[in-house]
Image (cartoon, rainbow, N blue to C red):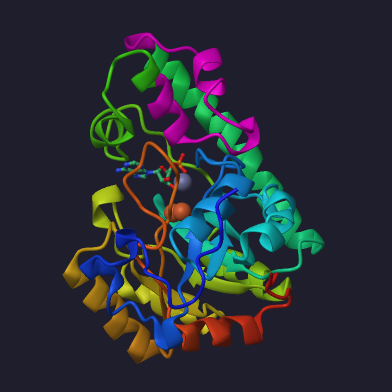
Amino acid sequence: MVPRIPPGAARPSVLRPAEARGAGTLGGVRIDPHTHSLASDGTDTPAELMARAAAVGLDVVGLTDHDTVRGWQEAEEAVAATGVALVRGTEVSCSVDGIAVHVLSLLHDPGDIALAELLESARTARLRRAQAMVEGLAADFPITWESVAAQAGDLSTVGRPHMADALVAAGVFPDRDHAFASVLHSSGPYYIHLEVPHPRDVVGAIRAAGGVPVMAHPFAARRGKVVSDAVVEDLAAHGLAALEADHRDHTGADRAHARALARRLGLLVTGASDYHGRGKPNQLGENLTAQEVFDEIVAHGTLGVVWP
Ligand code: AMP
Ligand code: ZN
Ligand code: FE
Ligand code: FE
């Protein structure tokens, strides 16, 4: 087990890059509210993720696997031993006119039937879409549904990262990023759009379940098309709480854009690593959320933070 780093002790250098500064570290509290585990397309178990969060000196981590809460229990059980507080969340897949949008739901009631059903239908859509994409890829590359499935911890949250891993395992690409830059890109011939609800409906379902909706990487154009400011304005009118400005896939201009829009619409601004473990360069704690913003999120969420 990785020991908790006491407050004031020297922090590992991963938390020192310029990207982490300015993301807000009021009171020295380090909060990274958006990460993934093996419960979706990350590569760490939830317990490993919590131990790694302790090792890099995080105080609070949010576990936000795609369309599932499956990893929560194991992460909760790791809180006491690691000394890292846990924000329970989910990154919900949404779609606007063929553009993929991700909305984080933080601190929602997992027993809320409507949101649980929405997540379940997103998982069903994921599985069907993955099977269709793999059918296309398998015609041209030495992968099979079985080889992709072998990369996924849980088939119900299977996605392009698992297809990337199968392509890497077959020797087609050196890593996930190369696979995404070519055959898996959303503008490529093998891409099939994930048919999921409009974020307006998802934001409403998250609020009804007592969650706090945060739009993840809203202007990350390297991933594909992004929505217009008008879409964000509409979401703000329907209960969106925050924009994730500080994210690796945002340029400096994207971050400034997100901050300015958040200010105009009265939204909070967050930052996070979107850590996925091995296979993606995102390092835990590379972007952070300010404590005052975190306090607002906690005040509006139904679930409590799991404190050590
Ligand atoms: P999917 O939900 O199946 O369309 O896959 C989207 C997921 O793929 C995102 O949540 C990221 O984890 C990952 N992803 C998106 N773009 C890239 C990229 N350029 N390189 C590596 N991973 C990516
Ligand atoms: Zn992901
Ligand atoms: Fe995302
Ligand atoms: Fe994510």
In which quadrant will I find the C terminus? Answer: bottom right
**Can residue 135 be seen in this snapshot?**
yes
Q: Look at 56% across and 29% down and name the residue there.
A: 152
Q: Is residue 306 left or right of residue 167?
A: right
Magenta-drawn stretch contains 145 = yes
Foreground of the two, 157 or 239: 157
**Can residue 95 be seen in this snapshot?**
no
Q: Look at 42% across and 20% down and name the residue there.
A: 166
Foreground of the two, 149 or 99: 149
Magenta-drawn stretch contains 303 = no
Tell me where residue 41 appears, x and y as whole percent: 51, 40
- Height in image: 302 above or below 175? below
Tell me where residue 229 appears, x and y as whole percent: 32, 74
Q: Main secondary structure of the magenta part?
A: helix
Q: Is residue 4 left or right of residue 301?
A: left
Q: Is residue 40 left or right of residue 176?
A: right
Residues rendered magenta in the picture? 139-166
How many numbered marks, from 0 up? 0
* Quadrant hosting residue 290: bottom left
Q: Look at 66% across and 75% down and name the residue there.
A: 207
